[in-house]
Amino acid sequence: MQAATLNTPDPAPALLPHLLRALRAVVGREIGRFLRQPSRLGSALVRPLLWFVVFSAGFHNVFGVAIAPPYETYVEYKEYMVPGLLGMVALFNGMQSSLSMVYDREMGVMRLLLTAPLARGWLLAFKLLAGTALSVLQMVVFLAIAWAFGVELPLLHLPAALLAMVCGAVMLASVGLVFSVYVKQLENFAGTMNFVIFPMFFISPALYPLWKLEESGAWWLLKLAQANPFTHAVEAIRFAMYGQFNTTAWAVVLGCTVVFFVAALWGYDPQRGSISKKPGG
C-alpha cells in the first residue's frame, strides 16, 4: 500500500514545464515564421513609413503649432504622428495575426492545437502573446526609424513608452483574436479587415488631435472617437512617451483587453461559441 502511494505520479509539478513547452512552441513558431520572411517586416513598415514621410511633409504647417497635453510646447507634426503610427503597426499586425489563425483553422492546424492537453485559455493566451511579440518588434523598429528621421523622444521615458506599446499591442491582438472567431473563410477576411481597421484608425487621434473635431463641430465623430478603443491605445502611448499617465486611456486599454480576450475564449469554446458552427451554418 505504501509502495503504491509512493509510485503515484504527481501531475502538479509537470504543469509549469508543460506550459513553457507550449509557450515556446506557439510563440516560437510565429516568430520563427516571421523571421524566415524578412519581406513581412518590410511590408509591415512600408505603410506607416509612407504616411510618416508624406503626411509629415504635407501637413507640417497645418498641425505643427498645437499645444495640448501631453505636449508642453509646440511640436512638429511628424512628432505628433509617431504614437498614432505605432498604433497603426499594432492594429494591422493584430489583424494579420487574426488572418494567420483563420488560415491555421482552414488548414487544420488550429483544430490540432486546440486538442492539446492544455486549457483552451492558455493556448489562446499564447497565440495572443505571439501576436503581441510580433507587433512590439515592428513597433520598436519603426520607432528607431522615426528617431533616425529626426523625431526626438525623451530616452528617460522610453521604458514607460515601451510598456504602453506592449499593452496597446495586447489589446489590438485580442481584437484580432475575436475576429478570427467570426471570420470563417480567408476570402471573407480582406473585406472584414478594411471594415474594422480603417474606421478604427481614422476615427481616432492618430493623425489629428480630437479637439480639431470639437472645433469643427463634428460632435458625432468626436463621440465615436472617444468610444474607439484604438483612440485610448494611441493616447496611452502618446502620454507615456512624455512621462505622463493617462488614467482613462489605461483603464480603457486594460478593460478592453480583458473583454476581448474573454469574448475570444467564449467563441473558441466548441460547446458554446461560434467556432463550433460550420462555415455554411
Image (spheres, grey):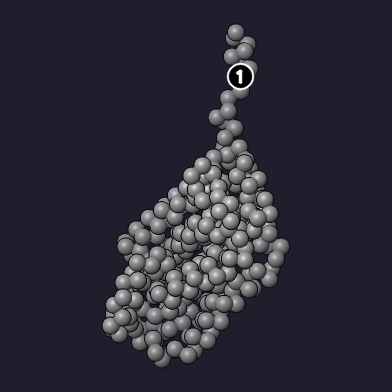
The residue lying at 51 percent from left, 81 percent from top is 52
Indicate the quadrant where residue 216 lies. Answer: bottom left
The residue lying at 45 percent from left, 52 percent from top is 263
- Residue placed farthest to the right in the image? 36
Above or below: residue 212 compared with residue 34? below
The residue lying at 55 percent from left, 70 percent from top is 191
Q: Is residue 240 visible?
A: no
Residue 133 position within the rendered picture, expressed as x and y whole percent measured from the top left: 56, 58
Above or below: residue 115 compared with residue 204? above
Above or below: residue 15 compared with residue 215? above
The front one of 146 and 89 is 89
Residue hosting label 1: 8
Report the number of discs: 1
Q: Is residue 252 visible?
A: yes
User: Would residue 7 appear left or right of 264 to someone viewing this image?
Assistant: right
Residue 106 position within the rendered picture, expressed as x and y whole percent measured from the top left: 65, 55
Residue 49 position within the rendered picture, expressed as x and y whole percent measured from the top left: 56, 79
Residue 81 position within the rendered picture, expressed as x and y whole percent measured from the top left: 45, 78
- Residue placed farthest to the top in the image? 1
Mark 1 crowdedness (10 Å alpha carbons): few <14, some 14-19, many ≥20: few
Indicate the quadrant where residue 132 lies. Answer: bottom right
Q: What quarter of the picture does the N terminus occupy?
A: top right
Q: Amino acid at mark 1?
A: Thr
Q: Secondary structure at mark 1?
A: loop
The residue lying at 61 percent from left, 37 percent from top is 117
The front one of 106 and 50 is 106
Indicate the quadrant where residue 70 lies. Answer: bottom left
